[in-house]
Image: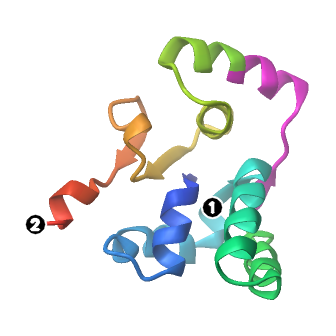
Amino acid sequence: MTIVDTCGWIEWLTDGVLASEFEPYLLKTELLIVPTTIQYELHKWICRERSEAMALEIIAYTQQASIVAFTQTLALRTSALSQHYRLSFADAIIYATAEQENAGLVTADDHFENLPNVRYFSKKQTAI
């Protein structure tokens, strides 16, 4: 099971330089976990950058995966991980969800680069 961080979704949706790295994970919805926080971030970004119609299409696509809501138990673990790794609120929720679900996290976000159970793709390597 895998969580693709919001940056990976955006790379894929915009055909960014790392789109091909994220695509295999995003096409296997039966193995994909989507925290509701990622749904929020995607909806917000797509509405701002594209359209509400496209945002709703992508949210419908995420619904084919396993959706994990933000619960009290997850909130408390998020707090602990945020403090330990100095993660922002959203990043800590995503990381805590991956931990709770025994899933890998796939990302290009530098905040996760050296954390356990993270598959990190560097944009720096592809920029050359």
Give the residue drawn at x 70%, y 57%.
41
Left/right placement of residue 81 relative to residue 116 reads right
Q: Position of residue 7 (x, y in %)?
A: 51, 59
Q: Would you place residue 49 above or below residue 92 in this image?
A: below
- 102 sits left or right of 46 in the view: left
Report the amino acid beneath label 1. Leu
Q: Quadrant of residue 15?
A: bottom left
Q: Amino acid at mark 2?
A: Ile
Element on which disc 1 rests: strand
126, above or below 53, in the image: above
**Residue 67 highlighted magenta (yes or no):** yes
Residue denoted by label 2? 128
Query: Residue beneath label 1, please?
Result: 32
The answer to whether residue 104 is above or below residue 11 is: above
Highlighted range, magenta: 66-78
Foreground of the two, 30 or 68: 68
Residue 24 or residue 70, whichever sits in front: 70
